[in-house]
Amino acid sequence: MNGLILNIQRYSIHDGPGIRTVVFLKGCPLRCSWCCNPESQLPFQELEFRGSLCQHFGKCISVCPHNAINPDPFVDDLLKIDRSLCTNCGECTLICPNDALSLAGQWMMPEELLIECLKDKDAFRRSGGGVTISGGEPFVQPDFLKALINLLHQNNVHTAIETCGYADWKVIENIVPFINSFLFDLKIIDPNLHAEFTGVSNSIILSNLIKLAKLTSNIVLRVPLIPGLNDDEKNLRSIARIAIENEITEIHLMPFHQLGKDKYLRFGHPYKISEIVPFPTKLEESKWIETRLRIFTEAGLSTQIGG
């Protein structure tokens, strides 16, 4: 049984208690307009092109079996790879001398990944940390996820999952006893807006959250704050109400940033929210965050900025 792993991030302090190793699985059923990891969405390896590293030797052009690489050295980076022809076979990555071409995603067995995670076990023990499975969406690879979580559980490793909640309930339910903490993303309550900006309805997400809250109290709601999309008072008060109704007491607000914008270009994905720009000053951003934070704290919820 293999799983498609996007990245392993060590010594994280933002994705659960203590020092954590975060494992990012590839594949997600949502297409959030603000996603900062677009390379995590598709459930297969993807070719990444970094134009800044390309020296135009042209070796990749000759080995591409599908003629998917534009030979013009001056073509726009977004047009360098014809994604309709590219099969992500990776032949070009093997010959690129400057790593301008690479494949995102690595296939690993659960036992292999466990070995990597246990390298940090001393840090887990000293800090009260553990392993957080993130994505993409971890439940897109349910069999691999269950196998990995079982192995971590057998090795007494604290486990957390970051999920968008869009999954078959039976898959979630079966893994609840082995998870110490759920980091549950809740983005938009209005069903029409949720579908518009994420590509899917939120009915399954809300249903799963309610069911999950009946089985465990170890849930943290994570709320991205996207200016003009979901940061209005009505949406945030609705999220606060859902938290209170389900006896969820901890909220993490995740302010908008554009750190992943360049990735869209490198993977040939359209960036849908280019019209949203960061605040011109830190003071304005701080005031914006503080106003949204107050909605949750006044509702009696323990709320912090960031994970």
Image: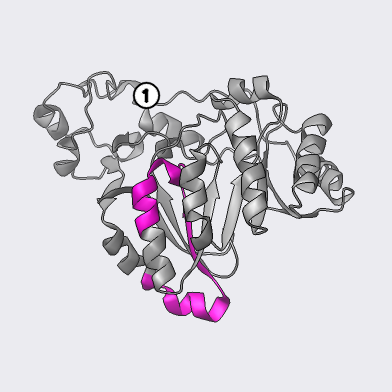
Q: Is 218 located above or below residue 33 in the figure?
A: below
Please give the name of the residue rendered at 23% of the width and 25% of the height, measured from the top-left corner. 86
Frontmost residue, 231 versus 163 = 163
What's the magenta region?
A: 118-147
Point out residue 116 in the picture as x, y percentages from the top left corner: 33, 66
Q: Is residue 301 above or below residue 156?
A: above
> Which residue occupies the foreground of this view, 82 or 147?
147
Secondary structure at badge 1 equals helix
Counting from the top left corner in percent of width and height, residue 59 is at 13, 34
21 over 91 or under it: above or below: below
Q: Residue at x 43, y 76 (%)?
A: 121
Residue 47 in view of the camera: yes
Mark 1 residue type: Leu
Residue named by callout 1? 78
89 left or right, relative to 17: left
The answer to whether residue 68 is magenta is no
* Residue displayed at 41% across by 60% down: 149
Is residue 26 or residue 184 the one in the foreground?
184
Q: Position of residue 181 (x, y in %)?
A: 58, 60
- Quarter of the figure with the C terminus: bottom right
Can residue 202 be seen from the camera position used here?
no
Picture residue at 31% right of the left edge, 68% below the top: 115
Question: In terms of image quadrants, where is residue 103?
Answer: top left
| Left or right: 286 in relation to 299 | left
